[in-house]
Image (cartoon, rainbow, N blue to C red):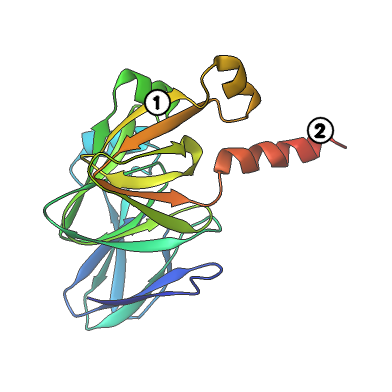
Amino acid sequence: MKYEILHQEAFPMVRYHLEKGERIKAESDAMIAMSATIDVTGGVEGGIMKGLTRMLSGEKFFFQYLTAQRGPGEVFFGHAVPGGIIDVELDGTYGMVIQKNGFLASTEGVEIDTKVQNLMQGIFSKEGFFVLKARGKGILFLSSYGAIHPITLEQGEEIIIDNGHLVAWTEDMDYHIEKASNGWANSIMSGECLVCRFKGPGTILIQTRNPGSFSSWIGSLGTAK
């Protein structure tokens, strides 16, 4: 697998080299440019029901498949929002849970499925009841709003994260929703209200910007006129 993440400091994209017969899958409309030897097709991985549950998790119904049919070539792909791209190598021993819009692409050995969260997580985590789950062996490309920063926790170590900044986390990590402060009044006045408490071991990927906060800021500009 030959690839590199270009322009990581600003608006990144991935340049991926495919040998003849190789294929990579990506979110719909991820392709920016490709060699003439590569074909792009669309499809529903895992059948209609899995496609529908991916939609419930905030992703698109179809995947995009990029295949080097007539010889080796390169494909460039990226995502719609200003933010980072990170590559995660899965070795088959663990999976990743991915927040909505976090999946960008993966090699064929990685299976993308959905996971149902419990009632509290589904209602208050801002991720909904369905989130994506990636398992298998291969390279997983994740995207974010803002830069991506990894936080690794040792056994029993805990951290509290604003749920608007989550990108992905290792699937066996324990996390629950709680108030940001001791009382509801302080939690609401602080602007944080509900947060996620994660417990290690495991790794959490966070994004440096919050899409919800940015949306609120854009809305405030319109009301200020």
| Amino acid type, callout 1 | Ile
Q: Secondary structure at mark 2?
A: helix
Left or right? Give the position of 186 relative to 180.
right
* Camera-nearest residue between 12 and 121: 121
The residue located at (19%, 40%) in the rendering is 47
Looking at the image, which residue sits at the far left? 93
Residue 216 placement: quadrant: top right
Q: Residues within 10 Å of mark 1 (few under 14, many from 20)?
A: some
* Camera-nearest residue between 122 and 222: 122
Residue 125 placement: quadrant: top left
The residue located at (41%, 32%) in the rendering is 196
Q: Residues within 10 Å of mark 2 (few under 14, many from 20)?
A: few
Residue 141, x across and y down, in percent: 33, 60
Residue 190, x across and y down, in percent: 63, 28
In the picture of the structure, the residue carrying the numbered disc 1 is 177
Left or right? Give the position of 21 relative to 211.
left
Picture quarter with the N terminus: bottom left
**Above or below, comparing residue 127 to residue 15 in the picture:** above
Residue 223: image tag: 2
The residue located at (53%, 70%) in the rendering is 9
